[in-house]
């Protein structure tokens, strides 16, 4: 295995966690959005990841991770009776997103720690590479 593949693997992990953090930020920013219909209400979005395999040797271990897409949460929206609200529908209901702030905070902490772990892997690999080069001097 090439020493440089370690950097590719760590970089793909950092990229994936950065995209995950963007989705968490989007969910948290839209947590208080209000709509008058179910179809227009913001829904919590979660990333779907897939492993990257070595193109030359598909039987080898995975070489990274990539975001395959984004899925919207299927949990029910919050329906609230507020007949005086300007966004209320004909029956007096407003709809709020299905964003769970506790889950989003846990996702944010997990993504941040995963990102930091990938940074530490890249730094350790860099230090090993530098030490290897210095042995030849």
Image (cartoon, rainbow, N blue to C red):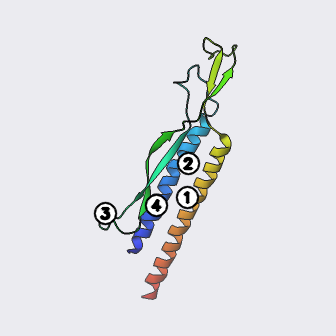
> Where does the image place residue 116, in percent across and percent down from the top left?
58, 61
- Report, in whole angstroms, how far the alpha carbon at label 1 lies from the one at label 4: 9 Å
Q: Quadrant of the C terminus?
A: bottom left
**Horizontal side, residue 89 vs residue 131: left or right:** right
Residue labelled with disc 4? 11
Mark 4 Cα shell of 10 Å, populated few (<14), some (14-19), many (≥20): some
Tag 3–tag 4 contact (CB < 8 Å): no
Which residue is label 3 attached to? 55
Mark 3 vs mark 4: give the one in front.
Answer: 3
Callout 2–callout 3 Cβ contact below 8 Å:
no
Q: Residue furthest left?
A: 56
Q: How many marks?
A: 4
- Mark 2 — residue? 21
Query: Which comes before the other along the chain, label 1 or label 4?
Result: 4
Label 3, secondary structure: give it.
loop
Q: Identify the residue at image location x=69%, y=14%.
A: 83
Mark 2 touches mark 1? (CB < 8 Å): yes
Q: Earlier in the sequence, mark 3 or mark 4?
A: 4
Task: Please tell me whether residue 113 is drawn above or below residue 61 in the rendered image.
Answer: above
């Amino acid at each position: 295995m090439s020493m440089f593949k370690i950097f590719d693997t760590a970089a793909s992990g950092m990229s994936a966690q950065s995209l995950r953090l963007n989705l968490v930020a989007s969910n948290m920013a839209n947590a208080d959005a209000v709509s008058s219909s179910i179809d227009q209400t913001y829904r919590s979005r979660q990333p779907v990841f897939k492993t990257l395999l070595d193109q030359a040797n598909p039987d080898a271990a995975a070489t990274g991770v990539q975001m395959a897409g984004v899925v919207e949460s299927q949990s029910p929206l919050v329906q609230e009776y507020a007949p005086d609200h300007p966004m209320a529908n004909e029956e007096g209901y407003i709809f709020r997103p299905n964003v769970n702030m506790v889950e989003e905070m846990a996702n944010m902490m997990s993504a941040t720690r995963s990102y930091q772990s990938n940074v530490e892997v890249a730094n350790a690999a860099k230090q090993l590479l530098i030490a290897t080069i210095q042995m030849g001097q």
